[in-house]
């Protein structure tokens, strides 16, 4: 087993900053809520959202033994951690040869394919199985639904097991209005159903945190963000809480009405915009190593040395900047475990 | 010496993607142009832009022996690499005790202070010297100019050498119109001059790549981006070229008119927006591990397996996602050296 949680019993106050914190109670509730809604194989947790085999182990403990990966490094790390009973690389790769030694050591790996080139790469690497990746409306990967049958035929001719289809409705999962989101998910899944009728197989893999309870076609949902959450997904009113914050130290206070903490662009995914402050107030802007902010109206400025907690706008690229997740018991505000973010890079 | 360049002689085509590439010729020209404009101690290169001691060594070879850091980890890494003749931590820190062992091993370290608390932290850590950090218009760190004298007095009373002042005109360095940029730089430096007259000392540290030839007050300029550059700074028409690209592989092509390469949000700093394509065309959007793009008008779609090069919008948070810089000889398109990005984290 690679990685492994480190047992620690330190005060949050003693952590160097910036540091990722995971609220143990909210995290456990998120996992329980999802396992209740989508038990066992109904969920294939996506590890790209947390890049952490120890966190994946908690998802495994909650009953989900099949996982989704976005990169070869994620597959390699999950295999090294022994979490390889059924790994789906839900992405197109040409250097699939990196999977061969993992399969030889007993990992069960399925990869997404959407072109003759990616089928050829999977076949050359002796990958066990594939899903035909179908474009269901997001302009990204996936073949056209009408091309899925020919691609499946090609894969089978090359000796690959075609387990079914995959189609990510990524354009729909973040739509704030639930009815409109449901409508777009349905529309996407109609396309995937067409492809599935042609391709066959027992797997229809799709969905994300935003569509986990709306996608009625998929046999398995590829949700990842639900475990830690972020402010973008929080807007959807889902039954998952923000478990992830970035702990930062106030390093400068200006009587002009602002303060600065040591958590900036290199500690936060910024594609969804500025982070939020857990205790309220306004984020003015982020620099490489700074967030400039003001407290809630009527409240005094913080003091130099105070700690604040910042909620990222997008969990995935935030975690990818950090070396570890610090699991915190909110009752005692102590760090109870440290989980390495061991699936970073490519 | 920690880190160190690895000698390699591989084809760029053999690199795993995404991968950071540094064009050796453009990089060398950037360093030469800057060393010509601001020789020796007139430039204090900021390592936050590249987080790489091997790159810093090339800046040292170009005559710059004093460096600027933004984090304690950067100071520790530069000291471990022996590049510690005069390190400025141009940021406020409270856990300055991490600097004590470095100083005991002979590193010469100066830190920025802007409050009684940061002065106390520096004094308690037996830091050698400080600069009084002055707010010159960017709402971030720095005391008000009128408070600088009292802070300097406090620092001297605590046994610290006050080498002078620092004031970063970060709100001005990115202004596209050169005359307006110059005006704002002047305005900021008038504030810093007031503080310097009160504080004394031989150092006035300020500036960045956008003001390297406009800032007439600073005795040393803290530029960093000039070495590798990005599309944000490219808009200013400076005499520095884009040396940095992200190499990516086309993994999917859709006859609807787009292609997808394996370089996404986790390989690119996104706070300045989407990256650009070195060979033209339009970036549609980035996902965690994907960039969706279309070729220039009238050109055919790429093929699956083709390589593309993407120019980041912001160099600093881009490099911070990667493990290495691959230095490429553009004449042969071969990787001539691999430089670890060894100053990441905190």
Image (tube, coloured by chain):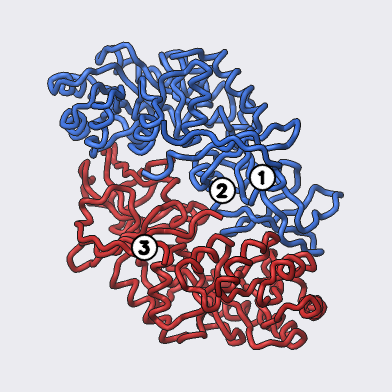
Chain colours: A blue, B red
Q: Quadrant of the C terminus of chain B?
A: bottom right
Using the image, name the chain to which the residue with label 3 belongs: B
Alpha-carbon neighbours of circle 2 within 10 Å: few (<14), some, or many (≥20)?
many
Q: Residue at x 51, y 39 (%)?
A: A340
Number of marks present in the image shown: 3
Residue A70 seen: no
Answer above or below: position of B337 versus B182: above
Q: Residue at x 22, y 33 (%)?
A: A118
Q: Are marks 1 and 2 in contact (CB under 8 Å)?
A: yes
User: From the viewer's perspective, is A116 left or right of A288?
Assistant: left
Image coords of residue B328 (percent x, y):
26, 64
Q: Residue furthest front?
A: B104
Q: Are marks 3 and 2 in contact (CB under 8 Å)?
A: no
Badges 1 and 2, same chain: yes
Q: Which mark is residue A310?
A: 1
Q: Residue at x 34, y 15 (%)?
A: A203
Q: CA distance from mark 3 to mark 2?
A: 22 Å
Name the residue carrying label 3. Answer: B244
Q: CA distance from mark 1 to mark 2?
A: 9 Å
Q: Quadrant of the N terminus of chain B?
A: bottom left
Q: Nearer the viewer, residue A144 or B308?
A: B308
Alpha-carbon neighbours of circle 1 within 10 Å: few (<14), some, or many (≥20)?
many
SS at circle 2 = loop
Q: Which mark is residue A140?
A: none
């Amino acid at each position: 087993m690679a990685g492994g949680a480190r047992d620690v019993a330190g005060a949050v106050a003693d952590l160097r900053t910036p540091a990722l914190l995971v609220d143990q109670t909210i995290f456990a509730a998120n996992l329980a809520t999802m396992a209740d809604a989508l038990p066992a194989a109904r969920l294939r947790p996506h590890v790209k959202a947390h890049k952490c085999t120890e966190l994946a182990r908690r998802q495994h403990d909650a009953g989900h033994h099949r996982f989704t990966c976005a990169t070869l490094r994620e597959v390699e790390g999950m295999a090294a951690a022994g979490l390889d009973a059924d790994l789906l690389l839900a992405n197109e790769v040409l250097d699939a040869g990196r999977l061969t030694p993992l399969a030889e050591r007993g990992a069960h790996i399925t990869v997404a394919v959407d072109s003759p080139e990616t089928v050829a790469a999977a076949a050359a690497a002796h990958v066990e199985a594939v899903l035909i990746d179908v474009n269901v409306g997001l302009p990204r990967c996936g073949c056209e639904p009408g091309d899925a049958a020919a691609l499946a035929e090609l894969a089978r001719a090359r000796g690959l097991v075609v387990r079914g289809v995959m189609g990510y409705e990524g354009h729909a999962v973040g739509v704030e209005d639930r009815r409109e989101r449901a409508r777009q998910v349905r529309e996407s899944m109609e396309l995937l159903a067409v492809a599935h009728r042609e391709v066959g197989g027992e797997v229809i893999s799709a969905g994300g945190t935003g569509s986990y309870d709306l996608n009625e076609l998929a046999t398995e949902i590829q949700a990842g963000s639900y475990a830690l959450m972020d402010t973008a997904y929080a807007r959807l009113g889902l039954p998952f809480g923000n478990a992830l914050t970035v702990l930062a130290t106030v390093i400068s206070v200006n009587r002009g009405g602002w303060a600065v903490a040591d958590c900036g662009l290199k500690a936060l995914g910024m594609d969804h915009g500025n982070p939020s402050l857990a205790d309220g107030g306004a984020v003015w802007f982020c620099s490489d190593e700074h967030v400039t902010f003001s407290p809630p109206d009527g409240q005094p400025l913080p003091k130099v040395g105070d700690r604040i907690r910042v909620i990222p706008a997008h969990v995935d690229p935030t975690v990818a900047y950090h070396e570890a997740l610090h699991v915190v018991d909110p009752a005692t505000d102590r760090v109870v475990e440290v989980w390495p973010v061991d699936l970073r890079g490519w």
